[in-house]
Image: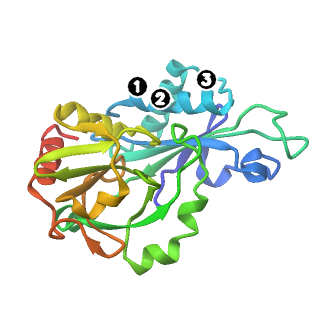
Amino acid sequence: MNRSDYCYFNGDLVPFGDLHLHVSDLLFQRGYGVFDYFRSRNGSIPWLEDYMERLFTSLELSGIELELDREQFAAVIHSLQQRNGMENGAFKVIVTGGYSDTLESMTGPANLVILNLAWEKPPEESFKKGVSLISERFLRPNPEVKTLYYFNTLRLQKKLREYNAVDVMYYTERISEASRANLFFVKDGRVSTPASHILKGITRKQVLSLFGEIHVEDVMAGHLYDFDEMFLTATSRDVTPVVSVEGKKIGNGTPGPVTREIRDAFRAKGW
């Protein structure tokens, strides 16, 4: 893991090697905690207000209280960025359920950890040639919460390697999302993206703002291979073409013209 020298922990900037959480934290005992992830680009942090809105919404829906308000949180982020001098990096914010005297329920305040990580751009080949996904019949509980619970992705590591896939597409009768990305589909030039049972991504929001003709609607899983194009949006991958799912081609198996247009427009904004 490429990371900076300093991170934030409960009010202090501390060396990464000095950061320790006790095993009584509900993150360990119950998998209870939320997180968020966002990037700095050329020294600025685009859409920080949007990321904070998502984080604080996740906290509210999870019943976890943070002692910082949004203004104080933003100040911490900028202080950490200044301390590390990382103009093009990423921030991973982790808020745990806190230390528990019972190892079962909340008895102490939440723990707040912020890591300042180096961000490595995915290979340009993934944008030019596209990526692959696998699929899993699964609906995330509380999808509007950016939870630390990734069991259903991690248990599929072998299958991900088998298909050289970058993520897992979740579906029931309808397609919802990937485990770390939102999904878009193109048919005869018409673009659609799932409307419900998703985490509303910040990159997704920017793409929707760029192209008013995108239809937010149910996408039926049975129609997956009828689409001409497919792409994903994510903080770590921006706009990335998807050319196959479970080894079967989407369209002709190459990034299509609509995906390239949206990717290029996104990049033209300097994002």
Rendered location of residue 60, percent (x, y): 61, 27
**Residue kind at label 2, given as amino acid type:** Met
State the separation of the CA atoms marked 2 and 3: 12 Å
43 or 112: nearer the viewer = 112
Rendered location of residue 163, percent (x, y): 38, 77
State the separation of the CA atoms marked 3 and 1: 15 Å
183 or 34: nearer the viewer = 183
Q: Are marks 1 and 2 in contact (CB under 8 Å)?
A: yes
Which quadrant holds the C terminus?
Answer: top left
State the separation of the CA atoms marked 1 and 2: 5 Å
Does label 2 or label 3 sit earlier along the sequence? 2
Residue 34 position by quadrant: top right
* Local secondary structure at mark 1: helix
**Residue kind at label 3, given as amino acid type:** Leu
* Local secondary structure at mark 3: loop
Query: Which numbered tag is attached to residue 49?
Result: 1
Depicted 221 relative to depicted 148: above or below: below
Query: Which numbered tag is attached to residue 52?
Result: 2
Q: Is residue 43 visible?
A: no
Q: How is the image coloured?
A: rainbow
Label 2 vs label 3, nearer the camera: 2
* Local secondary structure at mark 2: helix
Is residue 152 toward the left or the right of residue 216 in the image?
Answer: right
Is residue 242 toward the left or the right of residue 172 in the image?
Answer: left
Rendered location of residue 120, percent (x, y): 34, 58
Q: Residues within 10 Å of mark 1 (few under 14, many from 20)?
A: few
Residue sitting farthest toward the bottom: 162
Does label 3 or label 1 sit earlier along the sequence? 1
**Residue kind at label 1, given as amino acid type:** Glu
What is the tally of numbered marks visible in this picture?
3
